[in-house]
Amino acid sequence: GSVMDERLDYYAGVYGGSPIDDPVNIEDNYVIEARLTASPLGPVNANELPFTPEGTPLPLRASFTLQGFYGRLQTVDESYNPTNSVLTPNAALATSKLGMLGGDVWFQLGPAIMFGEFYWRQQRLVGTDDWYGALGAWGQVIVNVYPNEIGAGLRFNWIDPNTELAQD
C-alpha cells in the first residue's frame, strides 16, 4: 500500500508451499517478506527511462528502500521439462533456512536517473549449524541522450557468492 501522498510504500507477505517451479506443496515451507520505501519528495518515475511518460524532464525525487525475506526453502534439480513444457516434481537437493536483507537508493533529476541496490544473504542447511553468506551490489546511471526517446546507461555489478555451497 501507499500512505502520505505516495511518499511511503509498504509491502508484506507470508507464503507457504512449494519450491520454485514445483507443483507440490510442502507443508513446512514458508517465506515471510517485507519492503518499505520512503520517497520524501514524492513518487519517483514509474520506470527506469530518464523522462516521464509524458516526455518531460524528471522532477527532483529520491527514494530509499529496505527489504528482506526469511523462510524455509528447498532447491530442486530441474523440475521443468523444456521438451513438453510440463512441471515434474523432483526430489529436493537441499533444505535451507534462508534470509536476505537488501536496500536500494534512487535519485532522479532532469535527464538522469541513478539507482543502486545492495543485498546480504544468509543460508543454513537444515540439519547443520553452519551459516553461509553472500553479498552483492549493483548500480546504474541512465541519461536521456535523444530527447525523450532513447536513454543510455552504465551499470556496475559486484557479487561475493558463497563458494562453499554447491549451486550458490
Image: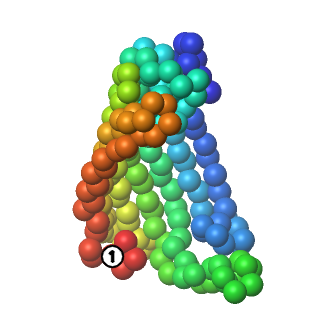
Q: Residue at x 48, y 16 (%)?
A: 42
Location of residue 26 with respect to 45 vertically, above or below: below
In the picture provided, is 27 more to the left or to the right than 68? right
Q: Is residue 70 visible?
A: yes
Q: How is the image coloured?
A: rainbow
Residue 21's spot in the image, x, y percent?
Answer: 64, 70
Split into 4 quadrants, where in the image is the C terminus? bottom left
Q: Which secondary structure lies at badge 1?
A: loop
**In front: 114, or 126?**
114
Q: Residue at x 54, y 48 (%)?
A: 32
Location of residue 153 with respect to 147 vertically, above or below: below
**In front: 22, or 152?**
152
Q: Quadrant of residue 124?
A: bottom left
The outermost residue toward the front is 146
Q: Quadrant of residue 80?
A: bottom right
Residue 152's spot in the image, x, y percent?
Answer: 37, 43
Residue 75's spot in the image, x, y percent?
Answer: 51, 73
Q: Quadrant of residue 136?
A: bottom left
Amino acid type, residue under disc 1 in the picture? Leu
Q: Which residue is mark 1?
A: 165
Q: Residue at x 38, y 36 (%)?
A: 145
**In front: 152, or 94?**
152
Residue 99's spot in the image, x, y percent?
Answer: 42, 54
Split into 4 quadrants, where in the image is the N terminus? top right
Location of residue 137 with respect to 147 vertically, above or below: below
Location of residue 154 with respect to 47 vertically, above or below: below
Tell me the crowding category of disc 1: few under 14, some 14 to 19, or many 20 or more residues within 10 angstroms, Cα based. few
In the picture provided, is 165 more to the left or to the right than 70? left
